[in-house]
Image (spheres, rainbow, N blue to C red):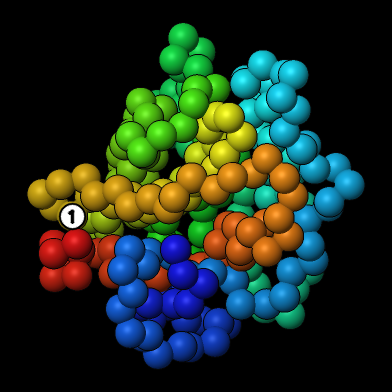
């Protein structure tokens, strides 16, 4: 995942226009990181990995920290507007975003601001299972439920693509970021590596926060060549 934009902004109103950058492998097609300087996430509260704890306890401690950090970063004032607004998933038309018997649940959902009618969604998901290179059941079900709900929303009817950015927590104390969209043929899911979150990393936290509050980009009213060949 790069911290440079790869597409023009989907709605450039009140936002700085940036020309497309050269393509980068696995660069997100539908999301753009925030360009302002952010206040660093709180280090004193960071839940350093505890080997004596059960794995699910370390995951849940990290989940609480990340959830609080993402919430705080959306509440601060910045010279330019952020690209998301919080809305509880229960207030959307989504199917359930949790399965206790499969050890996953969603705790945060964010959309674009209401005056920017775009289908993009961001979501924080916790999986109480070890992470590996395979997608989890929770990641896939959550992604599909978000997409279906957005495409069945009245004011979003012109759109045929509903991109999702997922922050996914996994054991032993890791996080990865997924971008998912349907290209008219397949569900396409790109993911970062599993970031080791056992110790505080200010640079990584800053990068994650910038992607979380960043803006929607890309064409979502048409199936374009870009996503057909992705």
Residue drawn at (51%, 13%) of the image:
100
Whether residue 54 can be seen here: yes
Residue 137 position within the rendered picture, expressed as x and y whole percent measured from the top left? 35, 26
Residue 47 position within the rendered picture, expressed as x and y whole percent measured from the top left? 78, 37
- Say how many tags the image has: 1
Whether residue 109 can be seen here: no
Q: As drawn, is 4 to the left or to the right of 205?
A: left
- State the residue position of label 1: 183
Q: Secondary structure at mark 1?
A: loop
Residue 67 appears in which quarter of the rendering?
Answer: top right
Closer to the camera in the image, 101 or 150? 101
Q: Tell me if residue 211 comes above or below residue 144 in the rendering.
A: below
Residue drawn at (48%, 45%) of the image:
194
Residue 222 appears in which quarter of the rendering?
Answer: bottom left
Residue drawn at (74%, 49%) of the image:
200
Name the outermost residue toward the front.
51
Closer to the camera in the image, 3 or 125? 3
Q: Tell me if residue 49 comes above or below residue 38 in the rendering.
A: above
Residue 209 appears in which quarter of the rendering?
Answer: bottom right
Closer to the camera in the image, 80 or 208? 208
Residue drawn at (85%, 42%) of the image:
45
Residue 117 position within the rendered picture, expressed as x and y whole percent measured from the top left? 43, 62
Residue 130 position within the rendered picture, expressed as x and y whole percent measured from the top left? 49, 26
Q: As drawn, is 20 to the left or to the right of 130?
A: left
Disc 1 packing (10 Å; few <14; some 14–19; many ≥20) = many
């Amino acid at each position: 995942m790069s911290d440079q934009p790869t597409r023009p902004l989907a709605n450039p109103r009140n936002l700085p226009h940036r020309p497309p950058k050269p393509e980068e492998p696995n660069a997100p097609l539908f999301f753009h990181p925030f360009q302002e300087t952010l206040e660093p996430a709180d280090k004193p509260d960071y839940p350093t990995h505890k080997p004596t704890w059960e794995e699910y306890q370390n995951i849940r401690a990290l989940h609480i920290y990340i959830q609080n950090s993402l919430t705080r970063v959306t509440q601060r004032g910045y010279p330019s507007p952020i690209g998301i607004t919080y809305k509880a998933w229960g207030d959307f038309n989504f199917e359930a975003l949790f399965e206790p018997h499969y050890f996953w649940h969603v705790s945060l959902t964010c959309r674009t601001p209401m005056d920017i009618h775009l289908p993009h969604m961001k979501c924080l998901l916790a999986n109480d299972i070890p992470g590996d290179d395979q997608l989890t059941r929770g990641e896939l079900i959550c992604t599909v439920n978000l997409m279906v709900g957005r495409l069945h929303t009245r004011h979003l009817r012109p759109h045929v693509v509903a991109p999702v950015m997922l922050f996914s927590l996994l054991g032993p104390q890791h996080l990865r970021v997924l971008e998912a969209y349907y290209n008219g043929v397949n569900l396409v899911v790109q993911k970062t590596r599993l970031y080791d979150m056992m110790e505080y990393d200010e640079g990584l936290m800053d990068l994650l926060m910038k992607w979380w509050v960043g803006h929607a980009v890309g064409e979502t009213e048409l199936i374009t060549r870009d996503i057909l060949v992705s």
